[in-house]
Amino acid sequence: MRANVFLIGWAWLAVFLVAGAKAQTETGLLEGPPPAVAAAAPERAVVQILVSSQVPVYDAPWRSHPIRRSTGTGFVIEGGRILTNAHVIAWAKQILIRRYQDPRLVPARVVFAGHDCDLALIEPLDPRDLEGVKALEFGELPAVQSTVVTCGYPAGGDQMSFTRGVVSRIEVQPYAHPGNRALLAVQTDAAINPGNSGGPVFQGDKVVGVAFQGMPGLQNAGFFIPPEVVMHFLDDVKDGRYDGFPMAGVSFEQLQNPAYRRLLGLADDGRGARVDNLRADGPAARVLRPDDVLLEAGGFPVGSDGMIPYFGNRVAASVAFHRPQAGQALPLKIWRDGAELDVEVTMEAYDGDRLAGRQHDVLPRYFIHAGLVFTSLSQSYLDTVGVLGRDRVWEGWARLLHTLHHLPAEDPAAARPEPVVLAGILPHAVNADIGVRGRALIHRINGVRIERLEDVRRAFAEHAGTHHLLEFVGHEEGPLEALDRAKAAAAHAEILRNYSIVSDHRL
Amino acid sequence: MHFFRHAFLRVVLTVSALGFVASAAAPAARAQLLARPGWERSLVNIEVTFKLYDAFQPWNEPTRAIRKHGVVVAPGEVLTTAQYLPAHTLVRLQKGGRGRWYDARVKWWDAQSNLALLETADAAFWEGLAPAPLARNVSRGPDFELVRWRDGNLETRRVEFGKFTVSEGALGFAPHVQLEVSSDLPGLGWTELIVRDGAIHGLTTYSSGRVCGALPAGFVRRVLDAYRAGDYAGLGYFDFTWQPGSNPELLKALGLEGAPRGGVVHAPGRESDAARSPRPRDIILEVGGFAVDVEGDYLDPDYGHLMLENLANRARFAGATIPIKVWREGRELTLDYVVPRADFADERVPREVFDGAPKYLVAGGLVFQPLAQPFLRGWGDEWRKFAPFRLQYTQFEKARDARKSLVVLSGVLPDTINLGYQEAAMLVVDKVNGREIATLADLAEALRAPSPEGGVHRVEFMPGRGLQRVVLDAATLESATKRVVEFYGLPAAERL
């Protein structure tokens, strides 16, 4: 699913501040009958965001890709801040905003970025730059079939664009920006195109969502982030820190099979979803057991299809788990051993799978020794590894993918908190004979099991033998390689100089 | 004489008709063509009809037919490659490139060597045919001729020697010597003959771009001789994993004295006797008396530098004892390594399955199959891209337990008994009613539990991110299975 979702607003478009064709403007540059949306002139709170960003090179982590320019949309909310998508401002080196009908470029900065929910708050460096702008207000979750209007600066023109459509459906969708999170999202047939990202979706004069992604292959289908996700983000940052959406660490399965219901002592009444799997270190595992049946979550009755009724919709029960903030308790009613039981799960933000998602704003960690470049295995690193059809190449890629995405759930004891890869080798006489040239998982160095990058540094630093011995992960025991310890130490600085690397580590 | 002239005419006509530039042939080459033995008296067409594997409905058995070549190598014997023969339903022979087809029988086939012998009881087929010799001397060309039947005419085209190499066969995983030739001809790999000086130097097995691979005559002759002598035990292989010793610092780190040499073992074998096998961090110095260089190659007196893997079958085949000299813990040691037989059945997720029709078991609409690569290939030519990743990766991961094979829930035939499980699929079975499952027979046995706990059969899948368990009503399972079999038109509920 992740691969099928694309982000909007990732290409630089030469967009200029131009009034909407029929909009009544503050400056009166254009005349004409005011449309409904212009009654309160909400578009005056909508800004274009111009971003210059620089993404690191994950297989050469001391380097960065060339500056990339992109545009997105944002809007002013209460408190003098601008809400937009996290993917609009990710890796930003410079953020400029253009107010509606204003020729000036206003420098801005990121205040909070919630990459898990693809939302961010930015603000102008000078708060006076938003003076006179009336903040937009949020409405409720729009009803399916109701009409919404998107507003932003999409591709295909220079002026602010408005599109109208209906709410097609509301359900949990994968969020493409983090890559490993799924939250409530609203699908609409209103056109949402590159550049719309971060723009408000209106119903009347209220914001009922933030446009954020589309899905290739689906025609007339764009997605926006609903008010509850936005409000969760805004509530989260009130204490000056963003914790993120909590993760209970539990997966539910439908409980529609008559034999399974009978086994668990449940009537065939359509109630309850079965606890199928629990993450060992998750908060739910401290309260729930496999084959417990979730009857209610946060006051929402849970059906045997694993769904809850949610303001006229039927959505995955996970939505109830996303409503509390980290640290808050979620009341559950469960069925266990033939009886109902009220329990609470104290929700926790979870970043144990941070590396399994796409990385944002935090430069990749690395360690270099004698030209051997070690870095963390992450989805962003994995994206640099091509997949070819030949078994041997496929096997190497598959080992990385399995280690990152499957092993933690399948065998937590064998999983490493920060799998380390030999990303590449900076050629030098001291390492030229090493056969493993990169994209290989490190098992041990000098007998030290590598759980994280700090172990690599320690394994090299504390070794007193004549050679450093590296063991890679393989089908069984993996390949071995060695470096002459003294020669490696002697060559290290020269290699850094040769390749213009300022620091041999970022840890 | 008449025969040879006729043959020449055929070649010229065929080439001309296909628009190829035949006139470039030098007079000397033409003279050689005239002097060529009559390959049309030995080269025959083979038509094979074989069953395909319907991965998603293994009870279906669609068929396909292909044509390839064979060559008469002995009275009453046609030699060909084993490709397409393992699941054959009909094999026919045709001589002279056209005309009548003769029913044939597969006398012998061997996946690892990719060789087969065919015969027919129809005496008329053998009339006018004569055995062709397999070359006794290894030739490096530089030129060979490739001979094939094409549109009823014998086509003979020049191909260039490429190299001898060692790789897995088209049907097997035991590495052995292969001949590579270069050619611009399209559509090769259907057991065309690579010939020179009136003898067969190779049987083609594949082509990729300009490279065409062939089984060298010397390899073919050794396997056939062993088979005819009744002592062919199948190809063997080295079951330990090694890497080239091309990093001298690694050899030093492992304590090797003297000049860099040998290959470094990094994983032990699973089939051979551990006490007589190389183990991790051993350096392989010699195999069967041949010194191993840092590339992992040895100097073969016939073929030149070849990868040491070829030594598993160079002198004898599976079961042979080969001395392997290793460097271990500061000294040389000679191991009497017994070469294990290459057999896909020993693989946890076999790359090929040749033992009959695909197995399956349907229980209450849940369809179970052995997990094997033919199943994964059910996703088509780009199966590496489209087949479920987690199933594919079972071929590459270190087994967490001792089970020798795996069973997968491949899908569900919807029925009331499996209500709620319609989307369950591509899950590897861990246990059924508490019993560990490695085979469909295990599964069938587990489901025969007379009174399972709670009145349900509990099917548990391997730990991971997917569904972990389902249950089936035990009291109605048998009747439900019968209902499913009838409703979906299955020939039987199981084929174990």
Image: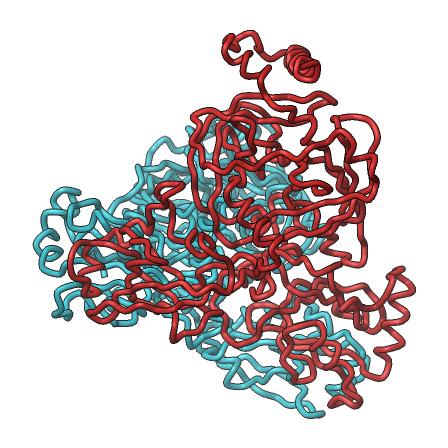
Image side of residue B248 versus residue A121, left or right? left
Spot occupied by residue A360 in the image (x, y as percentages of width and height): 37, 53
Quarter containing the C terminus of chain A: bottom left
Image side of residue A357 versus residue B487, left or right? left
Q: Quadrant of residue A358?
A: bottom left
Q: At x 50% / y 70%, what residue is drawn? A: B399
Q: Is residue A430 visible?
A: yes
Spot occupied by residue B477 in the image (x, y as percentages of width and height): 84, 78
The hue of chain B in the figure is: red
Q: At x 69% / y 24%, what residue is drawn? A: B150
Closest to the observer: A134 or B247?
A: B247
Closest to the observer: B166 or B443?
A: B166
Closest to the observer: A376 or A231?
A: A376
What sort of colour scheme is used for the picture? by chain
Closest to the observer: A380 or A287?
A: A380
The hue of chain A in the figure is: cyan
Image side of residue B356 versus residue A247, left or right? right
